[in-house]
Image (cartoon, rainbow, N blue to C red):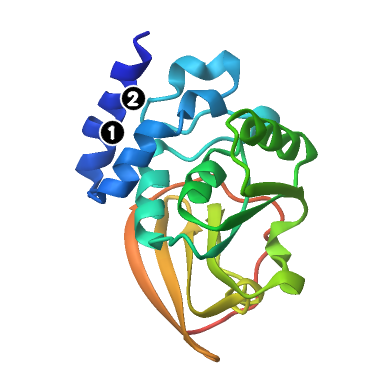
Amino acid sequence: MNIEQARFNMIEQQIRPWDVLDSSVLSLLAVVRREEFVPPAHRALAFMDLEVPLPEGQCMLAPKVEARLLQELQVHKHERVLEIGAGSGHMAALLAHKAQHVVSLEIRPALAELASANLRRAAVLNAEVRCADGALGLPGEAPFDVILLSGSVAAVPRALLEQLRVGGRLAAIVGNEPVMRAMRITRTAEDAWQRVELFDTVAQRLDGFGEPSKFRF
């Protein structure tokens, strides 16, 4: 497989047509080597328009979904990011190139170890993976500028929304199969959040998220 051609095709044929037009995101996808975050047995799938399998029945988000979420969050160099669901560490690597620091919470020890090893090998120094229940967030280290849920949830827990700084953004894929919707939620004041629906997609459910308490905007 010609890896560079496959990477180019992924960006031009999958990601750009999905309204990912931010040049900083597109150039980042050319630099962060997605194939190095894919298990060796599935490396041939690295650039395909699908969710690549990971250990323990988990999977990576499809490339175009990762790219679109990254674009919608508009991460800046001075910002602190919390990711829920490390997976292979690929999304944490993308976020780390745009942020000051990234903490990624992964409930499955095997995946936390995999993601940490991948980030070390890729020399990503400003992202760390912790084995923890992401549904709780990190209240002791809040507030965060950006929170990303790298998987789907039935609804976003209020506990996570409250860990956003005023002006901070949270992105998640919300709903139940067959209809899920990616959304961005911005904290506009101490007790106010604004929700924008972004696009329809389907993603694997994040571990550790039970049915949340009802929260209305």
Q: Are marks 2 and 1 in contact (CB under 8 Å)?
A: yes
- Asked which quadrant contains residue 53, the reply is top right
Q: Is residue 164 left or right of residue 98?
A: right
Amino acid at the residue labelled 2: Arg
Indicate the position of residue 195 as horizontal and vertical percent values.
40, 75
The outermost residue toward the top is: 1
Q: Is residue 129 above or below residue 53?
A: below
* Residue in front for this viewpoint, 172 or 129: 129
Q: Secondary structure at mark 2?
A: helix
Amino acid at the residue labelled 1: Ile
User: Few, some or many C-alpha atoms within 10 Å of disc 1 (few <14, some 14-19, many ≥20)?
Assistant: many
Residue drawn 59% across the image and 16% down it: 40
User: Few, some or many C-alpha atoms within 10 Å of disc 2 (few <14, some 14-19, many ≥20)?
Assistant: many
Q: Can the viewer see residue 78 in this picture?
A: yes
User: How far separated are the C-alphas under marks 2 and 1?
Assistant: 6 Å
* Residue in front for this viewpoint, 206 or 142: 142
Residue drawn 59% across the image and 56% down it: 101
- Asked which quadrant contains residue 185, the reply is bottom left
Q: Is residue 167 left or right of residue 150?
A: left
In the picture, which quadrant includes the N terminus? top left
Residue drawn 54% across the image and 91% down it: 191
Figure disc tally:
2
The residue to which callout 1 is attached is 11
Indicate the position of residue 35 as horizontal and vertical percent values.
48, 23
Indicate the position of residue 135 as horizontal and vertical percent values.
69, 62
Q: Can the viewer see residue 20 in this picture?
A: no
Q: Is residue 142 left or right of residue 33?
A: right
Indicate the position of residue 194 as horizontal and vertical percent values.
41, 81
Q: Is residue 58 above or below residue 147?
A: above
Q: Is residue 30 above or below residue 146?
A: above
Q: Which mark is residue 7?
A: 2
Residue drawn 69% across the image and 31% down it: 117
